[in-house]
Amino acid sequence: MDLLQDIALNVQSGYTEKTRKAVEQAVAEGIPANDILHKGLIAGMNVVAERFKTGQMFLPEVLAVAGAMKAGMTIVRPLLEMTNHESLGKIVIGTVRGDMHDIGKNLVAIMLQGAGFDVVDLGTDVRADKFIEAVEREHPDIIGMSALLTTTMVHMKGVIEALEKKNLREKVKVIIGGAPISRNYAQEIRADGYARDAATAVDLVRTLLNSTRATAAV
Amino acid sequence: MRNRFTTAALDSGALLFGTAKFPLTRRGVTIGGGSVIPEINFTLPPMDVEQGSMEEVKKIYLEMIDSVCRRAVELHQREIIVEFELLPEMTLNPVWGEEITALLQRSLEEFLDRDGLQSLLRITPVDIRETSKPPRRREGREVDTLFDAFRRCARAGGDMLSIESTGGKEVTDPSIIAGDLRGIIFGAAILGSADMEYLWEQICSIGKETGSIPAGDTACGIGNTAMILADQGYVPKVFATVVRAVTAVRSLVAYEVGAVGPGKDCGYENAILKAITGFPMSLEGKSAACAHFSAIGNIAGAYADLWSNESVQQVKLLSGMAPVVSMEQLIYDCRLFNAAVNKGSAGDLRDLLVDSDALLDPQAFILRPDVVRSLAKAIVAEREDYGRGVRVAWEAVRLMKDAASHGELLISDREGSWLERMELELNGLPATSMQFVSEETERWSDAFDCTQYLVETHA
Ligand code: B12
């Protein structure tokens, strides 16, 4: 069987050891690291993400699979770095100032990582200046903000204004989410996107990154 | 001093809405003395809470209290309970919490004088100990501020003291996401209970000092997080069900150190706690759908001495403002409860509430009175928190399996395999609390600071 397909299947089944072995073999056979990542590991993870989205798997089962993905990534990552591989995209995420609700934000982070994105999690109660610092330090493609309280969602606007003031707004896309948030609110504060749950957050990130890269290519 | 319950106060026949073994009376209002009273809660619309917006904040609270009380009077409601759930800023700046409490209590007194509307005010500060990272649970500025908020709000007119405390959350959060029952037992039954003992001893002494009632807590941060995640399909419902059962162990501790009820609305473990303690409880169900979805909209009502909307923000609906809508819904629910009591049909109504939900979801199933009673017995049969946690988890799994095999509970195959998984996990647990605590303390050493809990890890 095709070795890359084999890797994908092992990831899907959550077989950590088998994934590691298959990735090692692929590296030994000279398959490019980029192919191992995209056609093997991420292809496998995509199947899992789809099963999760359609209600065929629970999150703890997805997390077990993420362990297999991680085992493969540990081998592939140094090789990718050597070949100047371009990351799929980097997202800085956090729950806004005054808000300690973090489960939703954590789930979004987990699903984005699972889909192969680099995620920097700033935690909860994140003030605007911390978001700015992180943007300057990490150069993310996207920042994601979460708020669960009607009295903290207003701080999202403050972060966007701070980005504008620092002339950083054009450099990052901003996405938001949480129970009191709506598409309308996202439009009102001029965020680039809103997603109602973690699975659609992944789709949203993909769409936004595709559009930036497409624009960048023009 | 913690006095552990060793027997359950109520059998399943006596578990009924509106009636508690130990009713509570204050300022002419009796809770659990034969009728169900609405408990209304409301919160701010999207806005910043800061010094500059305080006048606006107070104005909105005044509008909300005034409008819900007015509707209560119009609907001939004679008693209401109001909950003021402080927002984080109002706990971090206790003077704001105090001022709003005073403003609400003043309004309630005006309605009493003018319209004869009797009322009590519950105040619920936020567990701000998590603001420091890692949370400092027993010392430091946040702890002092939290107790200052309790004291000020109590003195300003808070009749009943409550909190949604979050002890053990550092461990339960990741455990819920990972479906890790062992972690749940450690985080909730061990760390949660240890923290409850510390926290509620303080709250009870503030109660003594101020004359306010130390009411009760809720395991919202554990049980409802799991429930909401199950509702969204992230974790199995049978897992969320066992999580709920285990949370009863930690929420019980408040009553073992002096709280007397009514337990806080969003704690569905309150059904089990009512069976054990005989104290009145607040519950919420279908009329709290404005706050979050659930699978227990009717059955939760079977135990309610107070019936709550959890909370709703001040926004306009077609009929009026959302808190007034909630007030009206709760009043009609309570009329039905109380008409059943007056006609001698309370037992029948209770059975209808139970039967209409219990088959369809395991989280509803464990609120069946016979099941509640079994879970309560499982808890009081053990002295130690570890034993209680393990035993009640076993009992919940066993009862679900049994019911599913007799067609009394619908569980999908995918969910069913999780019952097996949890059994395996329970079978693998160490025999003694000491052993369990030292293993888990080691496993979670990166996640939490054990000095904040003072649990014993060695003999
Ligand atoms: C569990 C819970 C808690 C737990 C939190 C545990 C934790 N680790 O997060 C605890 C007990 C600690 C808690 C505390 C409080 N809470 Co609370 N809580 C909830 C509850 C019941 C569920 C939240 C949850 O975890 N949902 C599950 C997750 C998976 O869903 P989610 O967060 O919506 O996230 C999904 C999407 O929104 C989206 N998403 C989320 N973030 C992002 C970000 C991006 C970028 C994107 C794209 C998408 C996205 O994807 C996620 C995954 O699918 C809600 C009810 C509700 N309607 O949400 C109340 C609720 C949010 N809490 C409320 C309140 C009032 C409080 C307290 C103030 C109570 C108090 N007095 O102590 C404190 C405040 C603490 C603080 N400083 O922030 C109110 C808010 C009212 C208001 N004014 O807005 C609510 C609405 C309940 C209510 N109606 O009363 N709470």
Image: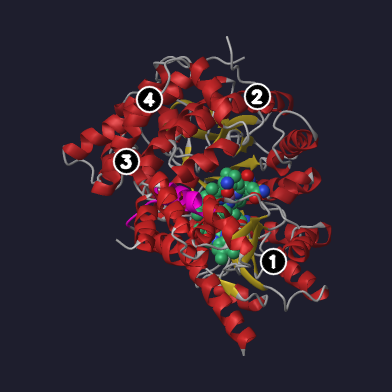
Quadrant the N terminus of chain B occupies: top right
Q: Position of residue A87 (x, y in %)?
A: 60, 67
**Magenta-tinted stretch:** A56-73
Using a 10 Å C-alpha cutoff, classify the residue at mark 1 as few (fewer than 14 neighbours), some (14 to 19) or many (20 or more).
many
Q: Mark 1 against mark 4, which lies toward the viewer?
A: 4
Q: Is residue B402 left or right of residue B271?
A: left
Give the CA distance from mark 1 to mark 4: 46 Å
Residue B128, given in percent of the width and then of the height, sits at 70, 41
Amino acid carrying label 4: it is Gly
Disc assigned to residue A156 = 1
> Contact, CB < 8 Å: mark 4 with mark 2?
no
Q: CA distance from mark 1 to mark 3?
A: 39 Å
| Lower sequence index among marks 4 and 2 | 2
For label 4, the residue is B428
Q: CA distance from mark 4 to mark 3?
A: 15 Å
Q: Main secondary structure of the magenta part?
A: helix
Residue under numbered circle 2: B198
x 74%, y 65%: residue: A135
When the figure is inspected, residue B166 is found, relative to residue A107, above or below; the finding is above
Residue B314 visible in the current orientation:
no
Q: Are marks 3 and 2 on the same chain?
A: yes
